[in-house]
Image (cartoon, rainbow, N blue to C red):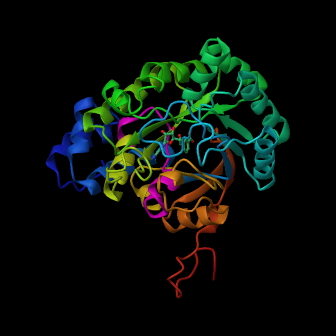
Amino acid sequence: MSTFYLNDTRLEPIAEKVVAGERLTREDGVTLFESRDLAGIGQMADYARRRINGDRVYFMVNRHINPTNVCRNRCKFCAFARDAGEEGAYEMTLEAIVEAAREGAADGAYEVHIVSGLHPDWSYEFYVDMVRAVREAVPKHVIVQAFTAVEIEHMAIIAGKSTLDVLRDLQAAGLDALPGGGAEIFSERTRAAAWEKKTSSDVWLRIHGEAHSLGIKTNCTMLYGHIETAEERVDHLIRLREQQDTSGGFLAFIPLAFHPVNTELADLPGTTGFDDLKTLAIGRLMLDNIPHVKAFWIMVGLKVAQLSTAFGVDDIDGTVVEEKITHMAGATTPEALTKQDLIDMIVETGHVPVERDTLYRIVEIFAEEAAPPAWDAGAVSPGGQ
Ligand code: V47
């Protein structure tokens, strides 16, 4: 029996369930979000995480590509989207997209991650050609993880096909996995207020279920820290958990910290480190059937991402190289990290860095890397004399 030091006594019945491996309820989720006992929540999330992932913290070498920011949806939380011809609008050619993917693979990437705006003039064939061309340009071990469920729905509309058929076409062209974006918060209230044109929760979940039925693995996200309530966050987590019970293909849950700068919600303050850590930890506790919880360092910052490995997180994502969606909304993080940066961040926390591909297949385990922290000049490395 593990002992947690809990300051908030309301967490005690939840702690018992965590140790027993019992599923947490909606009420437990709300209690967790209401609680200020971050250390207590963190201990429970660390316990849950260790049961699933042991000492490992995953990272990857990847390359993000955002082919265009021209988008017909114009969600209020988004600083990335532009109308065609508007200042700051851009669109990459197929050649430029393929070149970026090729460059990523040459730099050791195991994933090309493609997410775009909903360009009103791009044809269905262009999307399918994009996947085919990228697939052909990179070695087999590089996973093509492309298009959120929102883009899949957009393609279905422009092609006059079902979303299932779109996924089949993309899979035949070489699509391996879907990223988890576009889920935002599964609440009709928030959708009507801030992203009314965007894919509904039911459709987002249906598309992921369809992908899973074809053997396409996917991730899932939750955009938090804007106009949502604690109850809506919990409802979102429970709907993801129910979808996973049904279709089973989610690999990782990634809470996305809202960045307000240059958005129509710019009067909001953005998230705090406290809320980031709590949300990551609660994600680990509620989503007992999703194997990985990822802190996307681009959004939560390097310091919180590193700390989060003690709060239920087992993955800090990748080298990324180029990221526009969060940086156009005020992110102050770098756009790229080196593989060694990621290894060093993980080693300092006492976890074992594991390089993975998108499907969590192991590329390399860095068990021998444990070095003393840079400030500890007198320390002897575990591997040294
Ligand atoms: O879909 C948009 C969100 C998502 C803002 O699956 C914003 O491995 C914060 O989904 N502040 C794109 N978030 C990013 C994404 C993602 C990132 C890393 C890994 C994976 C994965 C997926 O970013 C969008 C939207 O939900 N977003 N604007 C903003 N201002």
Q: Is residue 257 above or below residue 368?
A: above
* Left or right, residue 373 beside residue 129: left
The answer to whether residue 63 is magenta is no
> In the figure, residue 185 lies in which quadrant?
top left
Q: Between residues 328 and 379, which one lies in front from this camera angle?
A: 328
* Left or right, residue 202 beside residue 36: right
Q: Is residue 55 visible?
A: no
Query: Which stretch is magenta?
Result: 284-305
In x, y percent, where is residue 143?
72, 39
Quarter of the rendering occupied by the C terminus: bottom right
Q: Is residue 262 above or below residue 348?
A: above
Residue found 64% across the figure and 11% down from its top: 160
In x, y percent, where is residue 33?
26, 43
Q: Between residues 121 and 314, which one lies in front from this camera angle?
A: 121
Residue found 63% across the figure and 67% down from its top: 369
The answer to whether residue 297 is magenta is yes
In x, y percent, where is residue 206?
50, 18
